[in-house]
Image (cartoon, rainbow, N blue to C red):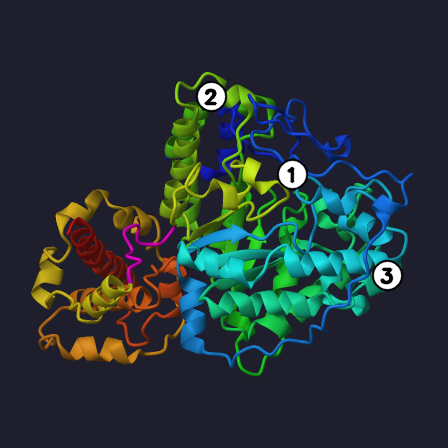
Amino acid sequence: MVNATAFSVLLHTLGLTQGSYKPAPRPFSVGGNSSKTPSSYAVNVPPGAQMLLGSSKGAPPLSKSSQDECYVEPYSPPPIKKQVFPPYDHDMATLYRYRQQQSVNLGSWFVHENWMTPSLLGCAGGSKLSELDIASGWGSMEAARALLERHWDTFITKSDFKYLASIGINTVRLPVGYWNLGPSFCKDTPFGEVAEVYANSWPRVERAINWAGEFGMGVLVDLHGAVGSQNGQPHSGISDGASDMFAKPEFLDKTIAVQEHLMRELASVSNVVGIQLLNEPKNVPELEDVYTRMIEAMRQVSIPSANAASFPLYLHDGFDLGRFDAYGANRTDFIVQDHHSYFVFTPSDQNEAASEHTKDVHGPIYKAFAEASSKERRNLVIDEWSCALTAESIANEPDKDQARRDLGKGQMDVYAATSAGWSFWSYAKEDCEDDIGWCFKAAVGKSLPATFFSYEKTPIDPKRTREISTFVANMNAPSTSEILSGQATNDTASDSSVEKQARFVILPQEGVPRRQHRSHAIHLRNQPDDQHLTPVERTTVKGYIDGFVAAKKFALGGFAKLGFIGQFVSDNMPKDLEAGTEQNYRDGFGRGLMEGQRQLEVKMAALESQ
């Protein structure tokens, strides 16, 4: 197996993407599908990265010599007041936060990228690259505010969440900048002079979270732009190239204050699955220390109805997989490593055939992600990836459409098997219909499958959905003798997605006390007297039944699967296990989880064949 610490060297050797930052895509033309974008899109792009399949056509740059083109129509919608979230529900929060994630990024909604929403940069100030340039341009703060508020209300709407839920997307990653929290958070920052542009921003972020919750979707709130910038890239809100969050202590202090505020506001919102501390930070030597300081501060926040100590916190690894799987492995709290995976930003990637990229995904990338995941209890997500390919990558493929589909589906399968979730970049952009590489709405059914449910054969028909739900509710765990004899899990599951999902996760970890579930007690009562069993056997059976019950509970919550398996086991370890049998519990839990999921997969397949 490939050692994750050597992952960067391996990827460079194979010609795969691994770098210290994600550049902004630049356009190119393939056949009749031309892309015309302003030259200002090319920012910090490594040599050769200018040719991306399906890049944005966008709107032509607006001329400052034409006053009419820079005119912003006044916008006065009904006030969006501070939102009220539903009361915190521990069981629902557990479902949202531990389940396997099929996710999409809502990029360029609250944090803009000029290649995704170029029409907002036409009359921007400065370099016309970043969020700050938009807020500083358009002739006045009133005009910039009207422009952005109209965008926030129309770019993505409630109907988009309904659509995503209908095709199996159960989570969204929502990039925000510190400026979105409102004017008070902009004071003494680069956004200080334009703070009033964002006076009505945060209620709209809250509204997005409530929209997601209405359709059973979780939200990962991603601090995409930290105070002073964590990476110097335009997608962090600035265009001066400086990473001042690390250089100026006052900016780091302000960023931590933002994170503490997010914890205070969101940890008790049931469908908020976590907070991402930073997006793609510069891979500086002190990054672990910075993260530790941030985590400790956030864990100390007092929240009346929730527990900051157990709330999921997501850390982007600075494109250094091996460095941060070790960091996660050395912690026991709910810390999740986020790694981003692309195949277009280096010269070697641009020249490698699409089919070879797909082989790499199924080979060394699979092995490296699996090893990293196993070290940190499966607390790994791939929260940015796409179907984008260069012209060279696709040019010699005999079936170009199939080659692109194979890469898209291959990434989905591998990321689901080796991690607790993935998130496609990105849901929407200007000229989306021409961009099946980067725009999720256009890619569905083309470069991506048509649906994305945790269980691939999840029925959509209401009658069959009810039938499956009834089946799940009535599923029974195997007997004690079957569990201990190894006959409880059907051998046909050995190559299934269920087996792949659970293979890397049940490793020794020190646990914390769990709450006893009523369903757990009911199942134990159905088992014969176990006093004759050895401590190891008794613990194995207990773990198996808990794993089987977990499969049922998550399936009854919208046909979900348990994703953060190792963390769930650690956080819910029974108090009464005999010393030295903890690993037997984990092993039993993994087998029981697999069996519960296998039974449901078999039932769904049988219904589909009818």
Q: Amino acid at mark 2?
A: Ala
Percent position (x, y) of residue 478? 12, 65
- Picture quadrant of residue 20: top right
Which residue bears the numbered disc 1?
21
Tell me: 153 left or right of 167.
right
For image coordinates 39% across by 18% down, the residue present is: 398
Report the number of discs. Answer: 3
Instruction: Please say if 410 is above or below 561.
Output: above
Q: Amino acid at mark 3?
A: Glu
Q: Residue at the far top: name it.
A: 396
Q: Is residue 448 magenta?
A: no
Question: Under tag 1, what secondary structure?
Answer: loop
Percent position (x, y) of residue 543? 24, 66
Query: How far separated are the C-alphas under marks 2 and 1?
Result: 23 Å
Tell me: 130 left or right of 10.
right
Instruction: Please say if 195 is above or below 284.
Output: below
Which residue bears the numbered disc 2?
353
For image coordinates 37% across by 42% down, the residue present is: 413
**Residue toward you, 295 or 500:** 500
Which residue bears the numbered disc 3?
142
For image coordinates 36% across by 54% down, the residue present is: 453
Q: Earlier in the sequence, mark 2 or mark 3?
A: 3
